[in-house]
């Protein structure tokens, strides 16, 4: 859609909001901080470990996404779990060997992995 005026831009914004809302309500999201600070700290390895663990367990209805800098560079790599109707939880200083525990405990069983939490939104 070409943006010709302010109303077009407002429509795009509203459609994006609706799509984001529908995605949040439809299932769980895993979000990895992939800014330059995250990548330097090992975020690519975390992303690969997440994809491997989800595939190995046959987990469906989970969106694995990346985002830019989250703003907590000293806590990188960062990994968020956002389950429907629950607070979004950010895990910090995540190592590839932490991923199976986070997936098992939090994603599958709903138990937050307290020793790795850096924020709840």
Image (cartoon, rainbow, N blue to C red):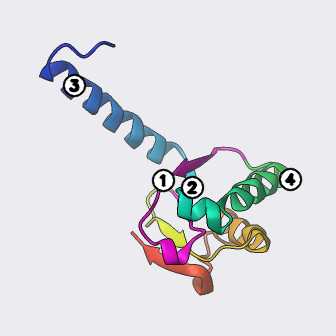
Cβ atoms at labels 1 and 2 below 8 Å apart:
yes
For residue 110, above or below residue 28: below
| Quadrant the N terminus occupies | top left
Cβ atoms at labels 3 and 2 below 8 Å apart:
no
Closer to us: 68 or 17: 68
Cβ atoms at labels 4 and 2 below 8 Å apart:
no
Q: Nearer the viewer, mark 3 or mark 2?
A: 2
Q: In this rendering, would 87 be left or right of 29? A: left
> Image quadrant of residue 110?
bottom right
Q: Residue at x 43, y 73 (%)?
A: 120
Q: In this rendering, would 115 be left or right of 55? A: left
Q: Nearer the viewer, mark 4 or mark 2?
A: 2
Among the two numbered marks 3 and 2 on one chain, the one whose residue lies closer to the N terminus:
3
Q: Residue at x 49, y 71 (%)?
A: 73
Q: Nearer the viewer, mark 1 or mark 4?
A: 1
Q: Residue at x 80, y 57 (%)?
A: 53
Per the rendering, the mark at residue 34 is: 2
């Amino acid at each position: 859609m070409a943006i010709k005026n302010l109303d077009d831009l407002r429509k795009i914004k509203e459609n994006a909001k609706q799509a984001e809302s529908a995605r949040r309500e439809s299932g769980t999201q895993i979000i990895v901080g992939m800014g330059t600070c995250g990548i330097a700290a090992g975020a690519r390895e975390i992303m690969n470990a997440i994809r491997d663990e989800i595939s190995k367990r046959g987990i469906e209805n989970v969106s694995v996404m990346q985002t830019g800098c989250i703003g907590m560079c000293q806590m990188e790599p960062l990994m968020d779990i956002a389950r429907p109707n629950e607070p979004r939880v950010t895990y910090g200083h995540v190592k590839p060997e932490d991923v199976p525990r986070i997936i098992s405990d939090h994603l599958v069983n709903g138990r937050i992995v307290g020793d790795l939490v850096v924020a709840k939104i």
